[in-house]
């Protein structure tokens, strides 16, 4: 497609899950990152669409990619499962309530303070002191006590068994560790005076809305990173960022963690086609979807048949190929099969407008001669779909879906709003349909499924279905189950219920895409779309 084409906007890349990476050179070296140089590259300068903001790891305003460089957790979530990080090992009691962590003894915070069991207790207590803020994490509602057993042994006691405890302890926030010397008023909920973690990089400079600098932690317990300096430069997403890359002002591009669109796919492919760059993509990280409000009993969206018809009417192949140029893949289920417990056989709903029409006719939604919109008992089949106004790809999808539904006799109004407004609608139930995504590989399925019962998340989505009570009962059971086979059975039932009811209509699976110069080694991915393991990268 030519850039002047009316379909130019179809070539934009959703930035929530896309990372476009380059490599850097020392000051004074050539800015042609694709060329060989006699100097060893040691710096990355990346563009971010937003400032790093408050880096307090126990709150939620900071940049997650930046926090991931500075702070660490007790354990790490990997493809192979939970692995040691700041805890070398741990024991779980037979009743599943008590976790005893044996900590590394060679770790210091960036300010020189020792990392030990007392620091762990102080940090977890600081998080719990603001428990209402963290209620979305079920672990925060189950912690009964925190105890220092000895200098490097820490005990965590829960009110009941909770199998996702280790997974939630591995997340980017809030159960990560900042030097107690940075606490304010003995905690972190009122703010912090510094940002000293134990991670591979230290925050060494910050000019609000301009840039932030991270330098290698030479005393890092895992060994000093080879990339010595990482700079985050605030730039508007899109063409401005591309021009900065071409001018050598930046050499590493990735988008913020809130979902505004970034560099377009055509430009990205041109970089790859030059032969100087490599393209690396992760497995599926999350699922982009349309969420339906089943609780609106006086609205057509309350009916399963209407939701199923919409599912059949969406051409996901076109969205994947034309809007995302293959960087996102077709999603047929709420969770991709690489998510824990999600490799479940569910009926496939293919793109088929004729099937959609049959479902509507059978449900009593008829199209009278000369009318453009179906009706049932005098009520028009009219719905509203909300999308993020900062995401051109969501707008494009909304327009495509609007056109498809018009052909079925469904009137679809599309409305763009700020992401905060859409999140508020999701919480209050003031929506028919809205764009959203699963929480992501690090959080799924447990966090997304827990949100099915949350008033601030997906309670309005799930509460109107016939099996709502059974669904919620199974969710409660799966979170406290200590038996692997029982958990799998419960998750299978949960996923089948919401799939059959079509309350979450999957569209595409998002992946992290890295475009980097050939001489950048060690490109890999974490179990999250919000971070990259910069400490593992190096230059040939």
Image (spheres, rainbow, N blue to C red):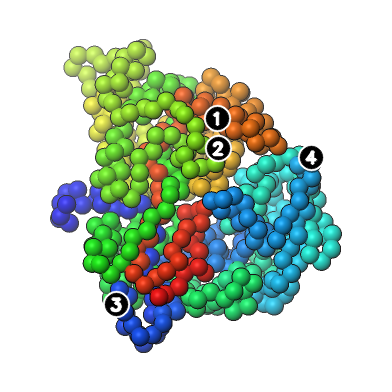
Q: Residue 144 carries which label?
A: none
Look at mark 1 in the image and give the residue it sits on.
492
Q: Is residue 35 visible?
A: yes
Q: Which of marks 1 and 4 is nearer the N terminus?
A: 4
Q: Kindly check if marks 2 and 1 are in contact, taking CB atoms under 8 A apart as contact.
A: yes
Q: Residue 95 carries which label?
A: 4
Under circle 1, the secondary element is helix
Q: Distance between the residues labelled 2 and 3?
A: 45 Å
Q: How far apart are marks 2 and 1 (CA)?
A: 7 Å
Q: Earlier in the sequence, mark 3 or mark 1?
A: 3
Q: Earlier in the sequence, mark 3 or mark 4?
A: 3
- Using residue 391 as the reference point, say whether residue 8 is left or right of it: left
Q: Which mark is residue 35?
A: 3
Instruction: Name the residue rendered at 70%, 41% in the picture.
Output: 162
Q: Position of residue 334 (x, y in %)?
A: 46, 36
Instruction: Name the residue rendered at 33%, 18% in the picture.
Output: 360
Q: How crowded is mark 4: few (under 14 residues within 10 Å), some or many (20 or more)?
A: few
Q: Where is residue 480 in the image (x, y as percent from the top left)?
A: 70, 36
Q: Residues within 10 Å of mark 3 (few under 14, many from 20)?
A: few
Q: Distance between the residues labelled 3 and 1?
A: 51 Å
Instruction: Name the residue rendered at 63%, 69% in the picture.
Output: 197
Q: Can residue 422 be seen in this view?
A: no
Under circle 4, the secondary element is loop
Q: Earlier in the sequence, mark 4 or mark 2?
A: 4
Instruction: Name the residue rendered at 33%, 82% in the picture.
Output: 37
Look at mark 2 in the image and give the residue it sits on.
341
Task: Check the image and name the residue furthest to the bottom.
Answer: 28
Q: Earlier in the sequence, mark 2 or mark 1?
A: 2
- Using residue 159 as the reference point, say whether residue 311 is left or right of it: left
Q: How far apart are marks 3 and 4 (CA)?
A: 59 Å
Under circle 3, the secondary element is loop
């Amino acid at each position: 497609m030519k850039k002047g084409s009316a379909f130019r906007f179809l070539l934009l890349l959703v930035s929530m899950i896309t990372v476009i990476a380059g490599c850097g050179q020392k000051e004074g070296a050539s800015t042609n990152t694709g060329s060989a140089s006699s100097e060893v590259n040691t710096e990355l300068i990346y563009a971010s669409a937003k400032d790093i903001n408050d880096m307090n790891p126990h709150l939620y305003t900071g940049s997650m990619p930046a926090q991931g460089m500075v702070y660490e957790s007790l354990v790490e979530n990997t493809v192979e499962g939970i692995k040691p990080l700041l805890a070398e090992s741990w024991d779980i009691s037979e009743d599943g309530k008590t976790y005893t962590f044996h900590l590394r003894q060679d770790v210091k915070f960036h300010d020189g303070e020792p990392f030990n069991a007392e620091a762990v207790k102080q940090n977890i207590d600081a998080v719990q002191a603001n428990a209402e803020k963290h209620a979305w994490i079920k672990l925060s509602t189950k912690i009964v006590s925190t105890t220092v057993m000895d200098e490097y042994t820490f005990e965590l006691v829960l009110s009941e068994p909770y199998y996702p405890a280790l997974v939630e302890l591995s997340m980017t926030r809030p159960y990560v560790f900042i030097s107690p010397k940075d606490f304010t008023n003995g905690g972190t909920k009122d703010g912090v005076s510094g940002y000293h973690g134990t991670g591979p990089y230290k925050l060494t400079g910050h000019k609000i809305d301009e840039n932030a600098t991270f330098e290698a932690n030479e005393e890092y317990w895992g060994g000093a990173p080879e990339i010595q300096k990482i700079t985050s430069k605030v730039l508007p997403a899109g063409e401005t960022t591309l021009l900065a890359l071409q001018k050598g002002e930046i050499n590493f591009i990735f988008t913020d963690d809130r979902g505004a669109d970034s560099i377009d796919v055509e430009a990205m492919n041109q970089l790859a086609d030059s032969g100087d760059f490599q393209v690396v993509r992760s497995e599926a990280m999350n699922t982009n979807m349309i969420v339906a409000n089943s609780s609106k009993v006086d609205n057509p969206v309350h009916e399963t048949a209407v939701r199923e018809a919409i599912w059949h009417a969406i051409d996901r192949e076109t969205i994947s190929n034309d809007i995302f140029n293959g960087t996102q893949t077709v999603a047929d289920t709420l969770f991709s099969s690489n998510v824990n417990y999600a490799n479940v056989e569910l009926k496939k709903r293919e793109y088929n407008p004729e099937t959609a029409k049959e479902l509507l006719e059978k449900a009593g939604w008829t199209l009278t001669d000369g009318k453009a919109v179906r009706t049932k008992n005098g009520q028009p089949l009219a719905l509203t779909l909300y999308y993020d106004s900062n995401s051109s790809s969501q707008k494009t999808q909304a327009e495509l879906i609007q056109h498809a539904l018009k052909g079925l006799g469904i009137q679809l109004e599309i409305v763009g709003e700020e992401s905060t407004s859409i999140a508020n609608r999701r919480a209050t139930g003031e929506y028919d349909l809205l764009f959203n995504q699963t929480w992501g590989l690090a959080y799924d399925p447990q966090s997304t499924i827990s949100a099915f019962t949350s008033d601030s998340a997906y309670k309005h989505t799930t509460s109107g279905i016939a099996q709502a009570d059974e669904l919620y009962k199974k969710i409660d059971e799966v979170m406290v189950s200590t038996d692997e086979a029982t958990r799998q059975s419960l998750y299978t039932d949960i996923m089948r219920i919401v799939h059959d009811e079509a309350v979450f209509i999957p569209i595409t699976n998002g992946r992290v895409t890295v475009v980097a110069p050939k001489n950048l080694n060690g490109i890999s991915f974490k179990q999250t779309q919000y971070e990259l393991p910069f400490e593992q990268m190096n230059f040939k």
